[in-house]
């Protein structure tokens, strides 16, 4: 009986560890870019958050302050989310990906963010735009 309990405990521990390792292995470079930017927003590291923007975004918002003003005004759920999870991803070109991110805002509301990312010549992934949809599918 004691041996059966030990085997059950080992199996339970293995199952608990297994999915998190699998999830970590499944994280893609575009997801790392998105996660890093959200972590920078949460930490108040505005310059680091800005560094994940694609050149086309940098040309519209040429400094950290104007970029962060846009984020705080138009993308509040992404600026300080309560939680987020990755959804579906789709390659839209040889160096382009659209990544769905399911977001719970600080106020508890649900959002879907559709991130457009591009891979630069140096191999890094940058955020080229975000479409934010309210939980009911309405665009903001």
Image (cartoon, rainbow, N blue to C red):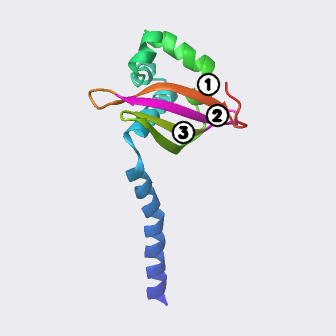
Q: Residue at x 43, y 63 (%)?
A: 18
Could you tell me which secondary element the residue under label 3 belongs to? strand
At label 3, counting other C-alpha atoms closer than 10 Å, the crowd grade (few under 14, some 14-19, many 20 or more) is many
Q: Which residue is mark 1?
A: 76
Q: Quadrant location of the C terminus? A: top right
Q: Mark 1 vs mark 3: give the one in front.
A: 3
Q: Position of residue 8 (x, y in %)?
A: 48, 79
Q: Nearer the viewer, residue 44 or 112?
A: 112
* Circle nearer the N terminus (1, 2): 1
Residue 2: percent from left, percent from top? 47, 87
- 103 relative to 124 in the view: left or right: right
Sequence-first tag of 1 and 3:
1
Q: Residue at x 39, y 43 (%)?
A: 28
Mark 3 vs mark 2, CA separation in Å: 15 Å
Q: Position of residue 137 (x, y in %)?
A: 70, 35
Is residue 53 within the magenta segment?
A: no
Determine whether the residue tagged by mark 2 lies in a helix, strand or loop: loop
In the displayed structure, does residue 81 sit left or right of residue 65? right
Q: Which residues are magenta?
A: 103-119
Q: Camera-side residue: 27 or 138? A: 138
Which mark identifies residue 100? 3
Q: Are marks 1 and 2 in contact (CB under 8 Å)?
A: yes
Q: From the image, tell me which residue sits under label 2.
A: 105
Q: Quadrant of residue 84?
A: top right
The circle drawn on residue 113 is none
Q: Is residue 93 left or right of residue 66?
A: left
Q: Indicate which disc, 3 or 2, sits on the residue closer to the N terminus.
A: 3
Outermost residue, right side: 136
Q: Above or below — where is 21 with respect to 106?
A: below
Look at the image and say whether residue 105 sits in the magenta stretch. Answer: yes
Label 1 to label 2: alpha-carbon separation: 8 Å
Taking 41 as reference, is 60 above or below it? above
């Amino acid at each position: 009986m004691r041996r059966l309990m030990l085997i059950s405990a080992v199996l339970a521990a293995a199952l608990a560890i297994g999915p998190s390792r699998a999830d970590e292995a499944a994280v893609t470079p575009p997801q790392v870019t998105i996660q890093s930017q959200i972590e920078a927003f949460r930490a108040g590291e505005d310059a680091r958050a800005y560094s994940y923007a694609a050149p086309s975004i940098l040309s519209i918002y040429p400094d950290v302050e104007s970029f962060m003003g846009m984020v705080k005004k138009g993308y509040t759920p992404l600026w300080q989310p309560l939680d987020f999870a990755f959804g579906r991803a789709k390659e839209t070109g040889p160096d382009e990906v659209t990544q769905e991110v399911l977001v719970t805002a600080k106020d508890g509301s649900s959002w879907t963010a559709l991130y457009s990312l591009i891979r630069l010549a140096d191999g890094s992934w940058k955020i080229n735009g975000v479409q934010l949809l309210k939980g009911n599918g309405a665009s903001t």
